[in-house]
Amino acid sequence: MPERSKTKLQKPVKEIEPKKVIIEKLPKSPWYKNPPIWIAICALIATVFSLRLTREQYIKSSRPFVWACNFEIPGVGNTIITAPSVTAFRVYNSPARIIKLDINIVLNGKELYYLHLKNLVRYPDEKVIWTSAIVKEAFDSLIVNFPDSLTNKLHKIISIEYSSLNGGKTYHFKMEEYFWSGINQWEPITEEAD
C-alpha cells in the first residue's frame, strides 16, 4: 500500500490589492460656511443646555428641605396660642439626615441657652412636625428676669446643616429671631437657606 503524504496542500496566497476611493464632489467652500454644520452645532449647544437645566431641576425636586418656624397651637375659635419656648422644624420633599442642629439664645452677645444636636434622621410628613423645647419654666425665668426694653434684644439663632439620606451635597438653613414681648413670640430678623 502506498504511503500517503502527511503534509496538507496549501493554497497559494493572493495579494490583496488596495482599493482606492475617490470622492468627486467635495464641497469647495470652507466648513464654517456650510449651513448644516451650524445647525448641528446649535443643536448640540441646545442639548447640553437642556441636560444641565434638567439636572438642576431634578436636584431641586428630589433634595430635602429643612427649616425652623415658631410653634403655635390652634386654640378655641380662630385664636392661636403661642409657645415661644418651643421651636418647630419641618422636613419637606424627601428624608433628611440632620448633620448638625444648633439653637442659641443670646442677650447682647451673652449666651443664655445652647442646644446642640447631631446625626438625626427625619422624614417628611405634612401632618407631623418635630420640635425642640426649652422647659417652659426655664424659658419664663429667662423672660421674667429682663424688662421689656431688653426682651427685644433677646435673640434666638437657629442653624441647621443637613443632607439627603445617601449623603451628597450638604445644605444649610440659618435663622435669627428676636423676642417680641408684646405678642409673646419670636419675630424673624434674617433667614438664609440654600
Image (cartoon, grey):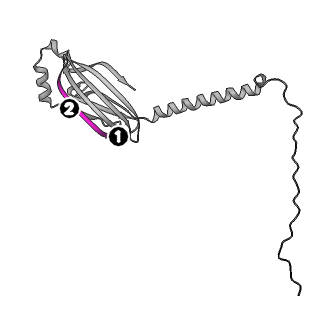
| 139 or 121: nearer the viewer | 121
Residue occupying the point 35% across, 40% down? 123
The residue where tag 1 is placed is: 123
Q: Residues within 10 Å of mark 1 (few under 14, many from 20)?
A: some
Residue occupying the point 38% across, 33% down? 170
Q: Quadrant of residue 153?
A: top left
| 122 or 170: nearer the viewer | 170
| The furthest residue to the top | 149
- Our reading of the magenta stretch's main secondary structure is strand
Residue occupying the point 31% across, 30% down? 160
Write down the region rendered in magenta. 110-121
C-alpha span from label 2 to label 1? 20 Å
| The furthest residue to the bottom | 1
Image location of residue 194, percent across then percent down = 40, 26
Does the magenta run of residues contain 45?
A: no
Three-letter code, disc 1: Tyr
For residue 23, side relative to residue 193 (left or right): right
Q: Can you tell which mark lies on residue 138? A: none
Q: How many marks?
A: 2
Q: Quadrant of residue 135?
A: top left
For residue 138, side relative to residue 185 (left or right): left
The residue where tag 2 is placed is: 133
For residue 189, side relative to residue 20 (left or right): left
Residue occupying the point 66% across, 30% down? 44
**Looking at the image, is mark 2 or mark 1 earlier in the sequence?**
1
Image location of residue 43, percent across then percent down = 67, 29
Task: Determine if residue 73 is in view.
Answer: no
Does the magenta run of residues contain 112?
A: yes
Residue 150 vs 82, above or below: the answer is: above
